[in-house]
Amino acid sequence: MNPPSGKAIVIVDDEKSYLDLMSQLLGERVSSPVYTFTRPLSALEALPGLDVGMIVTDYYMPQLNGLEFIVRAREIKPDAPFLIITGHGVHLSQEDLVHLPELKGILHKPFGWQVLAAEIVRHWAGPDAPVIKLDTVSS
């Protein structure tokens, strides 16, 4: 696999087991570093030090919901695109979408790592999108 690019994938989800699984699957198959946070405020503290290509956030979390997180995170990383992931029936209004042009989509759980990886690459900030390694069978 190619060495990781400078830009990172940031995932924020309070469900640690889900976060660990997505981090492992993406980390093994995507040529970009993956940083994970279970607390939105911890993610906001770390963002200034990260070169971000995509931020993925859960919608329902303690401290801040996904929309609140995006509003605060875009002040720190104004060029970063965002995806919301959710296990609930979240539907955003047109007004929400107009005020959050950085929000590129919503993925409803459950979904496979390939779906998440494809959406990350599709909406990546800048021309250096990560490479996805699909062949994971070792010889």
Image (cartoon, rainbow, N blue to C red):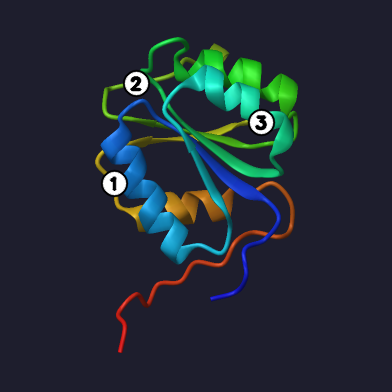
SS class, disc 1: loop
Residue identified by numbered label 3: 47
Dot 2 crowding, Cα within 10 Å, few <14, some 14–19, many 20+: some
Residue identified by numbered label 1: 111
Distance Cα–Cα, label 2 vs label 3? 25 Å
Q: Position of residue 115 (x, y in %)?
A: 38, 53
For this rendering, which residue is in front, 108 or 75? Answer: 75
Residue at position x 30%, y 29% from top? 15
Seen in the image, is 47 located left or right of residue 66? right
Q: Earlier in the sequence, mark 2 or mark 3?
A: 3
Looking at the rendered image, the disc whose residue lies closer to the viewer, 1 or 3, is 3
Looking at the rendered image, the disc whose residue lies closer to the viewer, 2 or 3, is 3
Looking at the rendered image, the disc whose residue lies closer to the viewer, 1 or 2, is 1
Is residue 99 at all visible to an observer of this figure? no
Rendered position, 132 above or below 20: below
Residue at position x 34%, y 75% from top? 136
Q: Earlier in the sequence, mark 1 or mark 2?
A: 2
Dot 1 crowding, Cα within 10 Å, few <14, some 14–19, many 20+: few
Residue identified by numbered label 2: 90
Residue 109, by quadrant, is: top left
SS class, disc 2: loop
Distance Cα–Cα, label 1 vs label 3? 26 Å
Rendered position, 34 above or below 69: below
Q: Position of residue 126 (x, y in %)?
A: 74, 51
Residue at position x 58%, y 21% from top? 70
Residue at position x 30%, y 52% from top? 112
Q: Amino acid at mark 3?
A: Leu
